[in-house]
Image (cartoon, rainbow, N blue to C red):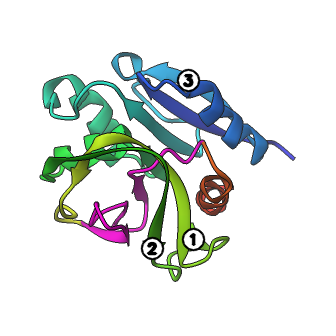
Amino acid sequence: MARSRVLVVNNGTLSLPQLRKRFEDLGSDTDAVTAASVPASLAGYQAVVLSGTKVRAYDQDFYKPLVDLVMGADIPVFGICGGMQIIAVANGGRLADGPQRVGGYEVQVDTEDPLFTHVKPTVTVFHRHTLYLQEAPAGFRSIGRSEHAPVEFLRSDDGRVYGAQAHLEFRSDGLEILRGFAQLYQ
């Protein structure tokens, strides 16, 4: 049986090897490109993952080709941390500074969403950031929340585009959430 292929867009994350390994452990081959070198077509890929970023998501001109590609794609997309913020800002979302969080934090998730098939209603996920999405932009809804972030997890209304404030490449709950995502394209 052929393995699925996932395109990982590296937006400057410090944990690209860990992110790729998660998907490879879940049965997918991965290719990594930078946001500046995304392919013109997603042919041959079953999913796209946008990594976190050290650059703020507000640079809409820089991220326009990436956003156009993933929003027009017919395959599942997952934005992680800065990747989610890039998608949200491009769709009218607003980010705000908040407390610096580094380490494991509890998040309540909507377990009826297929993303959370393998986890309990409260998960512990890894955070490394200070920016938070304040509300889901039009066409999206929050499917996870915490004390400091009303949108810890995001899903498009059509169920194709997901986002996580947390870095799911760490902690066991992160792996199980990515397992739920992998079931959408495998």
Q: Is residue 44 visible?
A: no
- If you read the primary sequence from the N terminus, does the residue marked by circle 3 or circle 1 appear first? 3
Q: Residue at x 29, y 70 (%)?
A: 141
- If you read the primary sequence from the N terminus, does the residue marked by circle 3 or circle 2 appear first? 3
Disc 1/disc 2 C-alpha distance (Å): 11 Å
Answer whether residue 67 is magenta in the image.
no
Identify the amino acid type marked 3: Ala
Identify the amino acid type marked 2: Gln
Write the start and end of the magenta stretch as one range: 140-169
**Circle 2 crowding by C-alpha within 10 Å: few under 14, some 14–19, many from 20:** some
Q: Is residue 173 left or right of residue 102?
A: right
- If you read the primary sequence from the N terminus, does the residue marked by circle 1 or circle 2 appear first? 2
Disc 3/disc 1 C-alpha distance (Å): 25 Å
Residue, disc 2: 108
Identify the amino acid type marked 1: Phe
Residue, disc 1: 116
Rendered position, 171 above or below 146: above
Answer whether residue 168 is magenta in the image.
yes
Position in image of residue 144 (x %, y %): 40, 69
Mark 1: secondary structure: helix
Image quadrant holding the C terminus, namely bottom right
